């Protein structure tokens, strides 16, 4: 995959009303985006899939919707005021700004690529007799690259854990990392940069309170933990789920909706007994990877990546990464947050946030396992994995079609209803079908252009089913249904439409896979 593919995705999203740059008529605003008429449908479907998988499937998980503005002391207690920083570095020639940690991660990824290329070359050369483990243990070039990568990795982890900014710069210099824009090694020192946006609440300048736009939704859950536990009579273990906006003043904003300054998170905090965190960490890892894989994309597109540096609150952490056009990238984080957040809030607010466990006959501050996924990154991964360009047609009439092979449950429009011609009662029949189905499925009517062109338009936005009304329809109530991925067409009775489509677009089948 390349930059080209990524550019195509971005323009496809714009051309078909999925994602627009924010404030576009004013030339946009860095790393802020708006969702268009189809984007909002896809986004809502992703959110529903997540929300229902949490609160419908688990009777001990409930939802909340907390405010974006919160008491500023919350961010002191959570550690964000002091520690929610990224290490930034500038190239003096291009004046471009980078995250020092990301530059080093990309450097390591280059060594991984080199190793992978050697392995692939050898696999081709030796065919069936190839033994990857032996090759990796003996090939000189592979051994050298592995040694280099490990050396960088060890220095990197130590520098992050010691918050050693001088060492981060030294790694960048020692391995001759160049700026991709200027091509030079003329770097500034590495500095810490706090990612929180702040604003003022209250009318007078003197009395105004400095407050922050939340950089994560999780704290809204922690500060409501007792409210929910008491009013919902929740027993540990139990979870609280929330979907909402978060804001981060990201240093680098060049990756479309992968890294935004205003984005949306779907987070679930699961409150447990201290000491049971590793068991629950594994359970939630398993549930969450199944949620992703149930959508039907190839397994090889997913991997876990354990954190090199644990955040200030965590004792175990892993990311679920998805293969984007620009490599494997984090889509979701699963963290064992211990009792860090609740204990900090106890200290700062002076109130007990404990749970009395009737089985143990004792009170404790619960431990927490968090699952945290970005709606926008999930959106991007779905578009990236679904986008295909396919050669279609026969030799004398070759054509390319762009098709979004989105899982039917997530597709913005489920059914397009197309009268063959704009007369003879066909538009009326099409409207009748839509009127019957629109309570259940998002349907679209289209009568403009040839049927072929209309199919292409629906392919490009990922509509799984098209139905064509023709003269025979008016006689016997049958229609031609066309399936997006196979382009297969068949004649069916109008009365069967609901069950055929319903079966494919229902989330039920996915939920069953998660609970297996
Ligand atoms: P990264 O290392 O990529 O900056 P992170 O580890 O800081 O991400 P978390 O704090 O774990 O991210 O946030 C949880 C999830 O929120 C991420 O997995 C991602 O899907 C999403 N997310 C975080 N930052 C952004 C952003 N700037 N734009 C879009 N989504 C984001």
Image: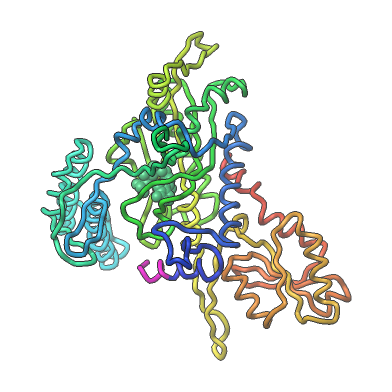
Quadrant of the rendered image containing residue 2:
bottom left
Magenta part of the chain = 1-7
Give the quarter of the image for residue 41.
bottom right
Q: Is residue 308 left or right of residue 468?
A: left
Residue at 40% x, 66% y is: 6
Q: Is residue 188 above or below residue 237?
A: below
Between 25 and 35, the one nearer to me in the picture:
25
- State left or right for residue 450 relative to residue 76: right
- Please, is residue 248 above or below residue 144 in the view? above
Q: Position of residue 276 (x, y in %)?
A: 43, 23
Q: Quadrant of the C terminus?
A: top right
Residue that appears at 54% across and 63% down: 18
The answer to if 428 sits in the magenta stretch is no
On screen, residue 232 above or below 502: above
Numbered label tally? 0
Give how far across and how far down residue 39 sits, in percent: 56, 60
Give the image location of residue 318, x and y in percent. Answer: 37, 40
Report whether residue 331 is seen: no
Is residue 444 among what the camera can see?
yes
Find residue 138 and report its horizontal and vertical position in percent: 17, 54
Magenta segment's dominant SS is helix
Residue 462 in the figure: left or right of residue 91: right
> At x 30% / y 34%, what residue is drawn?
82
- Considering every residue shown, the one lying at the far top of the view is 361
> For the N terminus, which image quadrant?
bottom left
């Amino acid at each position: 995959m390349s930059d080209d593919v990524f550019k195509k995705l971005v323009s496809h999203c714009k051309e078909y009303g999925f994602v627009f740059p924010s404030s576009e008529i004013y030339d946009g605003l860095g790393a802020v985006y708006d969702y268009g008429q189809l984007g909002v449908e896809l986004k809502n479907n992703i959110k529903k899939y997540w929300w229902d998988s949490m609160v419908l499937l688990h009777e001990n998980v409930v939802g909340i919707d907390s405010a974006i503005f919160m008491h500023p002391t919350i961010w002191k207690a959570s550690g964000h005021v002091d520690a929610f920083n990224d290490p930034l570095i500038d190239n003096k020639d291009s004046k471009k700004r980078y995250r020092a940690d990301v530059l080093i991660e990309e450097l390591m990824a280059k060594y991984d690529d080199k190793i992978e290329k050697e392995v692939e070359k050898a696999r081709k050369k030796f065919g069936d007799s190839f033994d990857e483990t032996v090759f990796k243990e003996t090939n000189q070039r592979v051994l050298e690259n592995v040694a280099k990568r490990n050396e960088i990795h060890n220095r990197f982890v130590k520098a992050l854990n010691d918050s050693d900014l001088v060492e981060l710069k030294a790694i960048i210099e020692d391995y001759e990392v160049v700026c991709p824009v200027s091509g030079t090694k003329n770097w500034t020192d590495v500095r810490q940069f706090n990612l929180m946006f702040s604003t003022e609440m209250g009318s007078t300048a003197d009395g105004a309170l400095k407050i922050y736009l939340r950089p994560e939704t999780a704290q809204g859950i922690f500060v409501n933990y007792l409210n929910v536990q008491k009013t919902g009579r929740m027993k540990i273990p139990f979870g609280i789920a929330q979907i909402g906006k978060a804001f981060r003043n990201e240093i680098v904003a060049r990756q479309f909706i992968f890294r935004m300054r205003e984005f949306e998170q779907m987070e679930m905090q699961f409150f447990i007994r201290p000491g049971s965190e590793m068991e629950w960490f594994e359970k939630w890892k398993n549930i969450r990877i199944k949620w992703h894989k149930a959508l039907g994309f190839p397994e090889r597109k997913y991997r876990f990546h354990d954190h090199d540096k644990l955040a200030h609150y965590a004792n175990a952490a892993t990311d679920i990464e998805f293969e984007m056009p620009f490599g494997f990238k984090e889509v979701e984080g699963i963290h064992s947050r211990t009792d860090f957040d609740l204990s900090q809030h106890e200290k700062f607010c002076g109130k007990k946030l404990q749970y009395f466990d009737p089985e143990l006959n004792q009170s404790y501050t619960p431990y927490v396992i968090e699952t945290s996924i970005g709606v926008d990154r999930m959106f991007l991964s779905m578009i990236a994995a679904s986008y295909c360009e396919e050669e279609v047609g026969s030799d004398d009439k070759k054509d390319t079609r762009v098709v979004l092979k989105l899982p039917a449950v997530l597709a913005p429009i489920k059914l397009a209803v197309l009268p063959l011609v704009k007369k003879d009662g066909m538009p009326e029949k099409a409207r009748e079908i839509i009127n019957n189905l629109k309570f259940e499925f998002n349907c679209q009517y289209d009568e403009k252009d040839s049927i072929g062109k209309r199919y292409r338009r629906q392919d490009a936005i990922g509509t799984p089913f098209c139905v064509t009304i023709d003269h025979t329809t008016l006689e016997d109530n049958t229609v031609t249904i066309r399936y997006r991925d196979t382009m297969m067409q068949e004649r069916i009775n109008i009365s069967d439409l609901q069950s055929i489509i319903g079966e494919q677009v229902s989330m039920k089948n996915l939920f069953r896979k998660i609970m297996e």
